[in-house]
Amino acid sequence: MNQIRAWLRIFLFVTTISIGIFLCIVSALFGGRYLDRNMKIRLQWIRVITKCLGLKIEKLGTVPDGVFLFTSNHRSFIDPMVALHYISAFPLAKAEVNGYPLVGFGARMTGVLFVQRHDLQSRRDARTSIEKTWEKGYSVLVYPEGTTHNTPTPGPFRRGSFEVAAELDIPVVPIAIEFQDPSDHWTERTLLQQYFYQFGKAGSRCRIVFGSPLTGYEGDELSQKSKTWIDATVAESRKAFDEREDNVVSL
């Protein structure tokens, strides 16, 4: 049953993203601020596909209005969809995503920044892209751990984006995400194996918490403030899931 469910969801994913890409192409043909329209199309697609995947999201905290650096811990390949369900931003993604069939093209059409994390020049270019994105009035979403972790607290944060935020006086909004099932945290499986595990089940439940905007004059300060808040909030979410584990309503 799980295999059938997972394949059905792949079919729905490919079908809906194809429709979304078509709409984005049509939107771009009309010119103007087509990226704004495409980001709205992306939002509608995310709302549809999260339901198709059986993803149950519990949101806490308030998303502020304005231009921000949204910074989150990283648990699963689905994390950006969870965050973009509530915020309008350019995610900073690893360069490999650009080559994914359909997903890469859709990402380019709807506002995604790419970085080769192990390439110094690519990271410098990403910082420049982040700065230009803010100048255009768009927020940016980053995962400063650089990869997914299943440890109780997030891994070390890279400071690059925080340094740019401090230089340009851009507030940082920390985000904490945690999944009820620790095996939904992607670390050892291949992408396909993780997909079949997480979305072959009837459902996957997660909690996303938005913190208050943080400001500071140094990148290290902003990074430490963000990590301290995220560490504590992830731990609180984990405790909440564990305490109600035996009483969770079936997905």
Image (spheres, grey):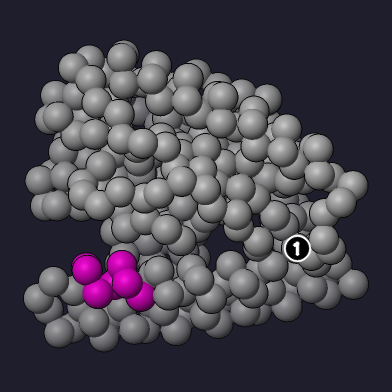
* Residue at (25, 52) in percent of width and height: 65
State how many labels appear.
Answer: 1
Which residue is nearer to you in this view: 13 or 203? 203
Name the chief secondary structure element in magenta: helix
Where does residue 142 sit, x and y in percent of width and height? 38, 39
User: What residue lies at 56% left-to-right and 72% top-to-bottom?
Assistant: 49
Res 112 visible = no
Residue 38 colored in magenta in the image: yes
Q: In the drawing, does residue 162 fall left or right of residue 167?
A: right
In the rendered view of the protein, which quadrant contains the N terminus?
bottom right
Read off the magenta span: 35-41
160 lies left or right of 60? left
* Left or right: 188 as drawn, with respect to 85: right
Residue 87 image-quadrant placement:
bottom left
* On screen, residue 29 above or below 50: below
Q: Residue at x 38, y 20 (%)?
A: 225
- Residue at the image position 52 percent from the left and 37 percent from the top: 176
Q: Nearer the viewer, residue 166 or 214?
A: 214
The kind of secondary structure element at disc 1 is loop
Which residue is disc 1 drawn over?
Answer: 203
Q: Quadrant of the C terminus?
A: bottom right
Compared with 36, 165 (above or below) is above
Q: Rate crowding at label 1 as few (under 14), some (14 to 19) or many (20 or more) other CA atoms within 10 Å.
A: some
At label 1, the amino acid type is Gly
Point out residue 16 in the picture as x, y percentages from the top left corner.
Answer: 52, 80
Residue 82 lies, with reference to residue 154, above or below; the image says below
